[in-house]
Image: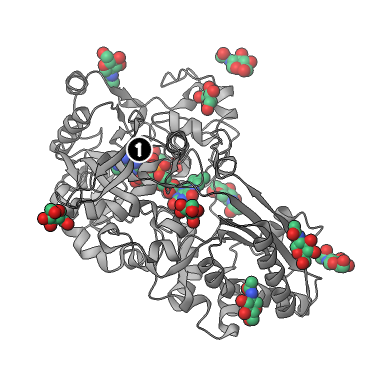
Amino acid sequence: MHGLIAHVLSAAAIASSSVLAANCKISPFDASWPSVDEWAALNNSIGGSLIRSTPAASSCYPDNPFGSSFNCTAVKSHWSYAANHSAWPESIDYSIWNNNSCVPPGVSGYTRGKGCSIGGMPQYIVDASSEDQIAKAMAWASDRNLRIVIKSTGHDLSGRSTGAYSLSIWTHNFKHTQYQQGWNIPGSNDTADVLICGGGNNWGTVYTAAHKVGKTVVGGEDATVGIGGLVLNGGHGLLSSSHGLASDSVYQVKVVTPDGRIIVANDVQNQDLFWAVRGAGGGQFGVVTEFVLQTHPVPKNVVTGGLTFYPRSKSTISKDASWFAFAEVASSLPDLMDQGITGTLMAVTGETAVSYLGLSEALPGASVMLSFLVYNSTVQNMNGTLQELAANITRASHNQVNLTLTSPEAQSYWSYTKPDFSASQSAGATSLLSSRLLGRNELCNLPRSDLVSYLQQISAAQVPESGTLLVWGLQGGKGPASTTDIRRGSVLPAWRTAYAHVMSYGGTVNATADPSEALAVGAKWYETVMEPVWRVWAPHTGSYMNEGNPFSSTWKHDFYGKNYRRLQGVKQKYDPSESIFVWSGIGSDHWQYDLQSGLLCRVHPQ
Ligand SMILES: Cc1cc2nc3c(=O)[nH]c(=O)nc-3n(C[C@H](O)[C@H](O)[C@H](O)COP(=O)(O)OP(=O)(O)OC[C@H]3O[C@@H](n4cnc5c(N)ncnc54)[C@H](O)[C@@H]3O)c2cc1C
Ligand SMILES: *[C@@H]1O[C@H](CO)[C@@H](O)[C@H](O)[C@H]1NC(C)=O
Ligand SMILES: *[C@@H]1O[C@H](CO)[C@@H](O)[C@H](O)[C@H]1NC(C)=O
Ligand SMILES: *[C@@H]1O[C@H](CO)[C@@H](O)[C@H](O)[C@H]1NC(C)=O
Ligand SMILES: *[C@@H]1O[C@H](CO)[C@@H](O)[C@H](O)[C@H]1NC(C)=O
Ligand SMILES: *[C@@H]1O[C@H](CO)[C@@H](O)[C@H](O)[C@H]1NC(C)=O
Ligand SMILES: *[C@@H]1O[C@H](CO)[C@@H](O)[C@H](O)[C@H]1NC(C)=O
Ligand SMILES: *[C@@H]1O[C@H](CO)[C@@H](O)[C@H](O)[C@H]1NC(C)=O
Ligand SMILES: *[C@@H]1O[C@H](CO)[C@@H](O)[C@H](O)[C@H]1NC(C)=O
Ligand SMILES: *[C@@H]1O[C@H](CO)[C@@H](O)[C@H](O)[C@H]1NC(C)=O
Ligand SMILES: *[C@@H]1O[C@H](CO)[C@@H](O)[C@H](O)[C@H]1NC(C)=O
């Protein structure tokens, strides 16, 4: 049964697996790997919910080696849809993280001759529908030194919901939502109107449930993204600058730990776990099967508007002016956000600017697109803000950028946020980026020439002609800053003074190279070119873990800050067997995960 996997592994990898065996999570090459009968016994004890990995694209290969029930043509035509990867038990959105083990011919990440293997995917999946099943399966795996991974939707940008030779716990079926008014907040005499949500929901299902009862919640901007990974690692969205991060709205969780305990955690019980999962929680301490989320009032309306500018010409004067214009906007963001504005800024250069803006040719300098929104306001107010900002940009650039306004419009909150599940076609082969949280110190309280220089440096591109993309989420500000201490959890403290979460996509990952080598090359570029800029510009902030660089050499500081040490204690307490590993997770430096061999081994053998 495991011969199919064996043939893709090199002799060297197998040899090293036996040398290191005692220090590694087990693999099918170990004598201690559970027998077919033992897997069957596990399956029996969990109500028949065990699935053998069956890569969806298996039907694209001769003799459909794993027996996929999906037509290859259909799999290939849906490969970019997040909703499909979410529904395929073994799949994730960015296939490089499972070593491109079984992708349909012709899609990005495919290489001729590689074939289809289980490879970097989990070996078995628990299609769980009860906490009890999860508890039994995780205790069983932990006892056997088997790696455990947790998948909700598979959206993760750092491949943290998959892993070779693992047992995957799939939260997909935990889809209940229940509105409860006057829910007693543990440890207080206050009540709240809450939405109790199963850990397998996505934002589309949660927003819809909240809408039905005339409420809303703080969550992400894409209907197919799961509440699990997003909330547990902080979570920003359309309402975070108003009401705090998604994890700031959590009153209680139900967690199944790797040693098989089912735990309710809130302000008065298991507070250490409750603190840890609200920020550092994704795939680190256990499976969260249920969240109690504070609901918020629905905004009376949404007013949108924006502007776009690019260098007037290819001249050096226009080029330089465009950077000053970008800096003018960047330094204005904190004040604008304090007035209630949220939204996105995108900055593009080179060929990327040509494709985003429909320019006729690449222009030196920066092109910037601003999409603002504000709640409970008017078209006139938004128009006034945009007119004023446009005048400031024109002045800062000495009229050397071409600028157009996007007309302000008002609409209902629901018409703006109504989920569209089929819209998300973001899945692909690779995902690697670097990000930073920026506040007034980094945007306002520095000489303008320094700000210009930093903006230029974070716009570096590994392939210079291709250019870069920067995405600035305007999701910090008042909401995260005004969250009370007890609601803050273990979220990176830098969020409390941040305004913008800035993602830089200048690196290029070769989708057809060996995945571990391609990732290493990409990681090296970010480490030597991009991370040093953030470290000088914003040494005291950090990065949002869900949209950050898992290979940054300063990941402990970047993602956890001063909370790292305390989180280590919580990890040791709830996952003593270190059954769950994620890239840049707490204690992940004890381990080396090699996508080549698929082995997860201790770096410093104990
Ligand atoms: C198109 C797109 C749009 C995005 N938009 C936003 C956005 O608006 N705001 C934002 O903050 N982020 C956004 N993100 C980033 C997003 O937060 C991460 O991709 C996140 O990992 C998604 O969580 P998931 O549960 O859907 O994914 P998964 O890949 O299933 O899980 C992600 C991580 O969380 C763990 N996990 C998931 N569920 C549970 C659970 N129930 N219990 C324990 N661990 C669990 C997994 O083990 C893994 O480590 C976006 C990502 C994409 C690709
Ligand atoms: C687990 O049991 C169910 C029900 O008997 C069965 O359909 C399924 O194929 C089994 N899973 C595995 C991996 O054998
Ligand atoms: C797969 O679907 C395509 C188009 O939808 C169809 O033409 C083809 O015959 C199907 N293949 C199989 C094996 O069913
Ligand atoms: C992809 O998802 C859509 C709905 O989201 C579904 O109708 C379709 O059958 C899925 N295709 C495959 C091949 O899984
Ligand atoms: C990962 O892919 C490479 C080739 O790209 C292959 O050599 C290696 O065996 C694969 N590893 C696993 C665990 O599938
Ligand atoms: C809740 O109310 C009771 C009775 O009024 C009071 O004794 C107690 O201190 C209150 N608890 C909190 C946490 O405020
Ligand atoms: C919008 O106004 C409503 C009604 O006054 C209020 O309850 C809500 O909190 C406001 N929303 C935001 C995001 O400011
Ligand atoms: C900017 O606008 C001017 C005046 O309309 C026009 O001549 C010029 O071609 C534009 N620049 C670019 C790069 O399109
Ligand atoms: C926005 O303001 C400008 C300048 O005052 C004005 O000409 C324009 O008509 C306004 N647009 C809207 C939609 O109010
Ligand atoms: C425009 O610039 C002035 C002067 O620096 C500043 O006071 C104002 O807030 C700016 N307006 C906007 C919308 O950024
Ligand atoms: C990507 O990797 C493949 C396989 O190693 C190689 O043939 C190709 O030249 C690489 N592409 C780039 C752009 O480096």
Q: Is residue 306 above or below residue 252?
A: below
Q: What residue is pinned by disc 1?
A: 151
Give the side of residue 423 with respect to residue 310, left or right: left
The answer to whether any part of residue 239 appears in the image is no
Image point (20%, 59%), residue name: 568
Taking the spot 58% from the left edge, 37% from the top edge, the residue there is: 423
Residue appearing at x 26%, y 42% in the figure = 183
Percent from the top left, x then y, of residue 472? 55, 62
Look at the image and tell me whether residue 466 can be seen.
Answer: yes
At which x and y percent is residue 104? 54, 30
Question: In the picture, which quadrant includes the C terminus?
Answer: bottom left
Query: Of 415 and 227, which appears nearest the observer?
Result: 415
Q: Secondary structure at mark 1?
A: strand
Tally the marks. Answer: 1
Query: In terms of depth relative to the viewer, which is nearer, 91 or 452?
Result: 452
Quadrant location of the N terminus in the rendered image: top left
For this view, does 32 lie left or right of residue 283? left
Counting other residues with Cα less than 10 Å from the Cα at mark 1, is it few (<14), some (14-19), or many (20 or more)?
Answer: many
Q: Position of residue 134 (x, y in %)?
A: 22, 31
Question: Viewer-proximal residue, 176 or 356?
Answer: 176
At a point 50% along the width and 39% down the height, the residue shown is 223
Label 1 is placed on what type of residue? Lys
Q: How is the image coloured?
A: one colour
Q: Position of residue 240 (x, y in %)?
A: 44, 56
Vertical placement of 43 versus 189: above or below? above
Is ligand 1 less than 8 Å from the beta carbon at label 1?
A: yes
